[in-house]
Amino acid sequence: MKFKIIDDLTIFLENIVPEKYLSKLDEFLLSGAIFTEASKVLAILVIFILVSEIALLLTLTILNLPVSMLILPLFIFPALFTYVIVIQERRAQQIEKTAPDFLRQLSSMLQVGLSFENAMEDMSQYGKGPLYDEMRRTIIEIRMGRNFDEAWRAMSRRLKSKELERIFGIILDGRKSGSSISTVLNEVSDDLRDLMALKRERKSTVMMSVMFLLISAVIATPFAIGMVGVYSGFMQRYGMESEIVLTAPVAGEIYLIIHSILVGFIISIIMYGDIKKGFKFSLPLATAAFAIFYFISTFGGSLLMGGF
């Protein structure tokens, strides 16, 4: 019965959600090694939230807990987003690590007389890892009639690495211009290896700054603003209400969200030099910061007074 509900809801979502959005969500989930259809993932999330809300509502009624805790099941969305982003980062790092050797092996196979397409196919049959998985997908697309250049560029975009996208673009341009592909592959392989070494060195030098920003955004600031909410609650409980006491928690929440988002953008600039990557840091940071703030502001007073 449960699976029938999921299937029915999946069909319903496929009918109401535009296909282009489902396709984008499919690509996003695939990049995070989630191979379930986007519509089915949405259906599972909707059912999970509904069941969780009902169970949580009963628990809150029995234990007399704050009704605001009903927001907790909604954290599944940023949690899923964070999971996919983490998998993307690990996948990109693994691809960047194996790409130089992959390109050098491809160059060696071209030097023994294989064509570019045959060399790709041969390597995809025996190699393991996300780069070889993408190569296999590209070969399937070419066999199904997709233009080689389009399939190659699409693969470079799916790798989620600007360095690899640039390198693969150089390889494609060299192939189209009639240059010696094996020579081009050797040269870009050496350049990519040096570039990855510089990238690792840069990350190691800025990691202390990144850790400081993370602690500030996820622990220090939420805890401090949460304690402001606790103090405001104490003041209201003893009848010492004022405009400052009432507005301070709300202003603190707004500041907390803005601070977390800005920290996400700063981290992206420090680590990658690209402000656009800040979006994927901002949502997890804002979610984690708000969760800690909510816990402190809701239960901090009870913990301090020994009543929890």
Image: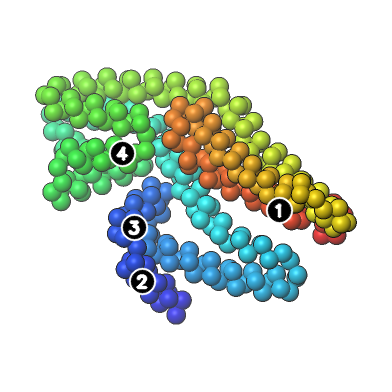
Q: Are marks 2 and 1 in contact (CB under 8 Å)?
A: no
Q: Earlier in the sequence, mark 2 or mark 1?
A: 2
Q: Earlier in the sequence, mark 3 or mark 1?
A: 3
The residue beneath circle 4 is 157
Dot 2 falls on a residue whose secondary structure is helix
The residue beneath circle 3 is 22
The disc labelled 1 sits on which kind of residue? Answer: Phe
The residue beneath circle 2 is 12
Q: CA distance from mark 4 to mark 3?
A: 19 Å
Q: Earlier in the sequence, mark 4 or mark 2?
A: 2
Q: CA distance from mark 4 to mark 2?
A: 31 Å
Q: CA distance from mark 3 to mark 1?
A: 34 Å
Q: Earlier in the sequence, mark 3 or mark 2?
A: 2
| Label disc, if present, on residue 295 of the rendered structure | 1
Q: CA distance from mark 2 to mark 1?
A: 36 Å
Q: CA distance from mark 3 to mark 2?
A: 13 Å
Q: Earlier in the sequence, mark 4 or mark 3?
A: 3
The disc labelled 4 sits on which kind of residue? Answer: Arg
x and y, in percent, of residue 245 in the image: 78, 49
Q: Are marks 4 and 1 in contact (CB under 8 Å)?
A: no
Q: Earlier in the sequence, mark 4 or mark 1?
A: 4
